[in-house]
Amino acid sequence: MTAEVQPVARPPFDAELRAGLAVVGGMFPPTITPDLIDFMRVSYAAPPIEDLLLAKGIVCTDDVVVAPDGHEVAVSVLRPKDAPGERPGVVYAHSGGLMFGDRFSGIDLVLDWVSDFGAVLVTVEYRLAPEHPHPYPFDDMYAALEAAASRAGDWGLRRDRLVVAGASAGGGLAAGLALAARDRNGPVLRGQVLDYPMLDDRGSTASTHQFDGIGVWDRVSNETGWTALLGDARGTEAVSEYAAPARARDLSGLPPAFIDVGAAEIFRDEAIAYADGIWRAGGDAELHVWSGAFHACDIFAAHTSVGRAMIRARNDWVERIIAD
């Protein structure tokens, strides 16, 4: 006799967002396996942004920074066209599950920080897994952060107003940068923006198991991403906290954090736990859990009520944290 399979109870998607999921699925399947990495590298590649930058009055300068192994990492420095002098700076890590995406993927949302708040954005072409497992993506990002401090004058940045930011996998990288900057007496950070961050390779939370084959970035996708980055070390005690910041046992001494996440996505519980860990350690975190939101809905459905509210809350925090 076969046991009856019970449906998994999960928070519902917001009605407006649910309507958009069918459109998203054509570009970003809910379940990503290793055989889909090549497809995703084409599907998730950023479109040309020259017209967007022109419309927003943003100037883009390309540069390189050098990773510890000598690899030259491409970065783009984006600044307001008519804003001379040193400006608050943001080092940004793109989304893409550590396996795909480029330094302009999903950047539309953070360009507001440049056009509206006068910040300078440094976006980084970090190397991707599985060809480049940990620590390469992290090392590339940290090299960019160090360069943002050491070359602040060249890039027009204020060393006292440096922020790290990222979305999804990029959010995990940004959290790792904040940990490493603290541990290594590195650049002093004004804040960290962790949008629905990918923090925990262990896949043990309730929310991880609530989303299989549904939404954006399900449990199998998450296993694919972490395995690409960590190989056989995934889920073991050998994993570095700079790769998976949820592994960190000490969350004290970190810069203020902005963390947002959907209630209807797999990263919900690890994001909440990370904010709670910062609070328990005496730190400052602003946490937003958006009812009915699927993963990265602000990127895929920025026009919706929930998407707009997410963007507005994040921008308000960034404007406050970089202000004098």
Image (cartoon, grey):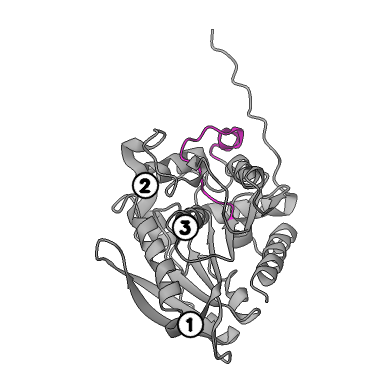
Q: Residues within 10 Å of mark 3 (few under 14, many from 20)?
A: many
As helix, strand or loop, the secondary structure at mark 3 comes to helix
Name the residue located 42 percent from the left edge and 34 percent from the top edge.
235
The picture places residue 269, in percent across and down from the top left corner, at: 62, 40
Seen as rendered, the residue at the extreme top is: 1
**Looking at the figure, which quarter contains the N terminus?**
top right
Residue 305 position in % (x across, y down): 75, 60
Mark 3 or 1, closer to the camera: 3
Residue that appears at 73% across and 54% down: 16
The residue indicated by pointer 3 is 177
Among the two numbered marks 2 and 3 on one chain, the one whose residue lies closer to the N terminus: 3
- Is label 2 in contact with label 3 (beta carbons under 8 Å)? no
Q: Position of residue 61 (x, y in %)?
A: 42, 83
Mark 3 belongs to which amino acid? Answer: Leu
Mark 2: few, some, or many residues within 10 Å (few <14, many ≥20)?
many
Q: Would you say residue 212 sits in the magenta stretch? A: yes
- Chain part drawn in magenta: 195-213
Residue that carries the numbered disc 1 in the rendered image: 50
Q: Is residue 92 above or below residue 129?
A: below
Instruction: Return the disc, 3 or 1, that comes first in the chain's sequence.
Output: 1
Q: Quadrant of residue 108?
A: bottom right
